[in-house]
Amino acid sequence: MLHIDNLKATIGGNKILRGLNLTIPSGEVHAIMGPNGAGKSTLSNVLTGRDGYEISGTVTLGGADLLQMKPEERAAAGVFLAFQYPVEIPGVGNMYFLRTAVNAVRVHRGEPELSATEFLKLARAEMALLKMDPSFLSRSVNEGFSGGEKKRNEVLQMTLLQPRLMILDETDSGLDIDALRIVAEGIERMRSPERSMLIITHYPRLLELVRPDVVHVLDKGQIVRSGGPELALELEVEGYDPGRRAVTA
Amino acid sequence: MAAVRTFPPKSDEKWKYTPLAQVIAAFDAATPGAPTTVTAEQLNSLIGGRDEIRLVTVNGMFDPSLSTSVLPAGVRISAGRVNVGESVAVERPIHIVHVGAPGQGPTVSSAMAIVDVGERSQVTLVETFCGLPGPMAIDGSLTLNVAASAQVELIRVQSAPRQAVLIGLTQIAAAANTNVHVVDLSIGGDIARHEIEARFTGDGAQMNIHGLYVPVGGQQHDTVVSVDHAASHCASRQDYFGVIDGHAHGSFIGHIIVRPGIVDTDAHQSNRNLALTRSAEVNTRPWLEILADDVRCTHGATVGRLDDAAMFYLQSRGIPKAKARSMLIEAFIVTVAQAIPDEAVRQHVGELIRAHATSPGHGDQR
């Protein structure tokens, strides 16, 4: 279970998150929607431990204090962020990267490392489900990948790392309808009673394929409204402004 | 015997980045010392055991007991000299190993070799500067004469002890239709300068030089490469990478000369640097003397830092910071090791680079 209490984050003197409260019980999928500049990406950065923010409040995952951990420790504790803009890393092979990551997390969790053969078998099976060509393993991390290929590579990492908290930051952006369906199926396969999922999105497209239990509206660094999946559709029709009026009225 | 080295005046542009006073002081303070021996075990612990032809010097003195005595046809080795005859394809690498073995106090040595490669021959040469720990001043030089249509692969590995001051000079004369590939690695030493003076003496030759300098802590690695296009229809390439950590200094001067009247010249130069800390110092200077018209010449230099976004991406996948760092450093320099065709040498160099990238002392001042 993810528990966020009165989270505030400031960068360069700008207050981005202003006392955010959010609880995602295990087994639930929550969506956060909101206009540009609401603090959606800052939330994913702060949860995963990116440098540069002044932070107060508490964030726990399964009772463990996330804010005290380094990014790699959070990953080992089960935090996974599917990046909005996956980073290209020329010269680092995708296979080497994926295996290093999987084994680092396994070692942290007290599990034995996977041999190259064991890893390859596992990776190929997951890639087949994501309709990724095995040649993606021999390329550099994300280098020259199309938008859709990068997002699939994110989902591949997610399925290999088996996180407890999945944060999907605008994972639907830049995907055509076929790629969106494959990515959504990959996400759906990860839904389980032990996992919490947070889908950050601007548009409700992905939420039609991965149905959330709860939808939140983030505005000016706070959750201003929460509701069921129908809220996503309502926002699509009405935009964010009516929501804001409804709360402040 | 240790030669008395003469140093250039401070105004010499090619010595611009080297702390000449410190270098001279190191040479002045050192003495040749008593003759020293190095055991085969010590040598193998320094450079590993491989199937190769060896010419070994200890403090600059030829050591026949550590050198290969049974040589393939067409190869001759004596004190400071290697000779490869005409039309000989030497299968095993020829390894010139200069071992520094300090005695009482700083040791000075002159470690030299002259290599003649005959027409149409093919050979892989490895030149290593290494040693047992201790203070030393080394004047290292290699003269490589490549006769027409010969192909030479030269891998220079500078892995001198950390207290060594090393001044190195590699002179290459490449005759017509030769193909010379140089891999130049600066890893060890305290202050280490290496100058390559390469000259095309005949038409239709090619020279590719890949280099890497990786100073850490307070090390200083200076590289000066000069390629003299004194013949027509020749192509040269200088590709140097620097990774500078701690408060180390790295410098590269890349000199290209194209003589008047020379036609159809290709000359390219690139120097890319990764400064890992704020206190790392990098100097890079292209120096082009193009005195002819029919020339295609490019040059470029960059100094960058480790990509924060890439670091965070790797860490966010559970990879510890130190490992993420070494992965990115390796990715930056991987092309240098990949450029070595001989597999055993490539592996050896890859291990040296990897050991260096993950050595303690890296990242301590981040």
Image (cartoon, rainbow, N blue to C red):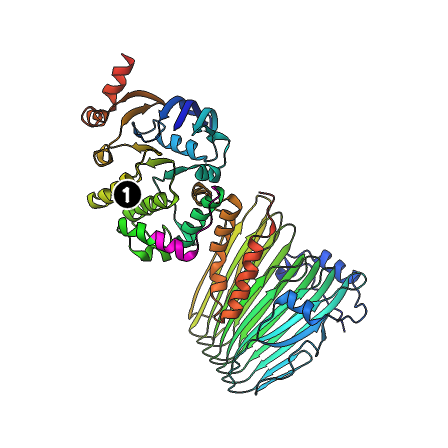
Q: Secondary structure at mark 1?
A: helix
**Is residue B259 something that shows in the picture?**
no
Q: Which residue is mark 1?
A: A186
Q: Amino acid at mark 1?
A: Gly
Q: Is residue A115 above or below residue B144?
A: above
Tell me which corner region of the image, top left, top right, bottom left or bottom right, holds residue A224: top left
Is residue B89 or residue B12 the one in the foreground?
A: B89
Range of magenta residues: A109-123
Residue A70 x, y percent position in the rendering: 50, 36
Q: In this orientation, does residue B76 appear?
A: yes
Residue A174 shown in magenta: no
Quadrant where the image shows the N terminus of chain B: bottom right
What subunit carries mark 1? A
Q: Residues within 10 Å of mark 1 (few under 14, many from 20)?
A: many
Against A119, residue B316 (above or below) is: above
The percent coordinates of residue A16 (x first, y second) are 40, 26
Residue A237 percent location from the top left of the image: 18, 26
Q: Is residue A233 left or right of residue A60?
A: left
Judging depth in this view, the residue of B266 and A37 nearest the camera is A37
